[in-house]
Amino acid sequence: MEVEASVPSLVAGEAGWLHTALAALLPYIIWVPYQVYLSLNDGGWKTLVKQITFGSTSVTSGHAGAKPALEARCQRQPDAPTRPDAGVTWQRISHCMERYTVQSSKSEGSDRLVLMYAWLTSKRHHVHKYASLFTDLGMDVVTVKITGMDLMQPTTGSQAVAKEVVEFLAGQPQYSRILVFGFSVGAYAFSEAVKMMHERGEYAGVKERLVGHVWDSPVDLPNMPIGVATSVTANEKIRRYVTSCVDWFLRTRHDVATRHYIAAANYFYRGPVAGPSLYMCSSCDPLSPVPVNDRITGRWQQLGHDVTTKVFEDTAHCANYTKYPKEYRNLVLQFVDKIGMLH
């Protein structure tokens, strides 16, 4: 059953060559200055040079088609977590994927994997906190993070990341039980991977190994403009301007961008994983509002999916665990037990 994405304001419009050219440049106008700002804030010019050298601001490095030498440099980058958990090995797979492997007495290692999609502005220490929930239970974790450039250039960005993720999972058959755990824009990023699993028969086996999915503050397509703006700045005036620019981008770049978002959203609306789901959001998150989430989970339930929902009170975007650590942890552990992944 095809579900039409509820984006009435995002329609394909006729645009002149100047509008088209400006829309094509918009991802660079928004994200390159932001990346420069972050790099200078984190470690000055040396950090910025390292970012450029290792290709982490490029939409091609680390993806299929990237130069092997560049990909090898990305994997050798010496920026592993400063305090890795005991008994856990960290590995950079590519510029968008990292793996936490639990040392196991089994020669073949763990058969349980958590595929974790981070939010746009997350840093490693943020994601590490969530990964520890599962490595403490003996599960391996692979984290995936798309950049703002990946998001706004789906064919060369987020879809390339999706291909990389699916190929990695296809090449790791020892993981017979895979739990998907996604935040914010990770809902879109994972939906691109699901779309690829459906459309390409060689990846059908990967989808069969997905046993459940957990979502924390997922962002639906109509909320993408405010989501991007919030990721870039806390200044309200600039945020309104960026929101308008992204909305204009979605209208102008329908054929090369928006239609891909809608196609991926349709897979999410139908339920991206056949197994049970845990769906969490906040009562006051403008990026992931309760009514939108209720429509999505209600649709899943109508389609026969097993859905557990939780609305946390007065938390910021992707901050539910920070404010309610005990309750959040208990919810996740109960869900993991429910889908048979505790052991």
Image: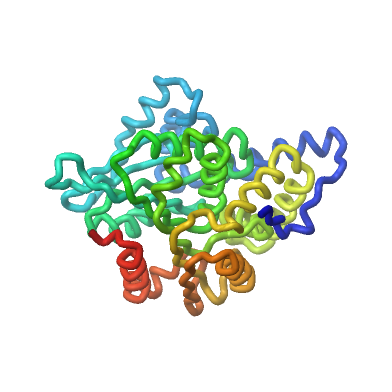
- Residue furthest to the bottom in view is 313
Nearest to the observer: residue 204 or residue 312: 204
Q: Position of residue 339 (x, y in %)?
A: 35, 63
On screen, residue 247 above or below 24: below
Residue name at image x 60 percent, y 64 percent: 287
Residue 242 on image: x %, y %: 69, 53
Q: Is residue 45 visible?
A: no
Q: Where residue 219 sits in the image (x, y, percent)?
A: 58, 59
Which quadrant of the figure contains the N terminus?
bottom right
Toward the viewer: 219 or 140?
140
The colour scheme applied to this rendered structure is: rainbow
Q: Residue at (71%, 44%) from the top-left corner?
A: 259
The reply, left or right, for residue 30 in relation to residue 176 is right
* Rendering coords of residue 174 (x, y %): 28, 41
Task: Decide if residue 96 is on the left or right side of residue 60.
Answer: left
In the depicted view, which residue is nearer to us: 93 or 211?
A: 211
Which residue sits at x=68%, y=56%?
A: 3
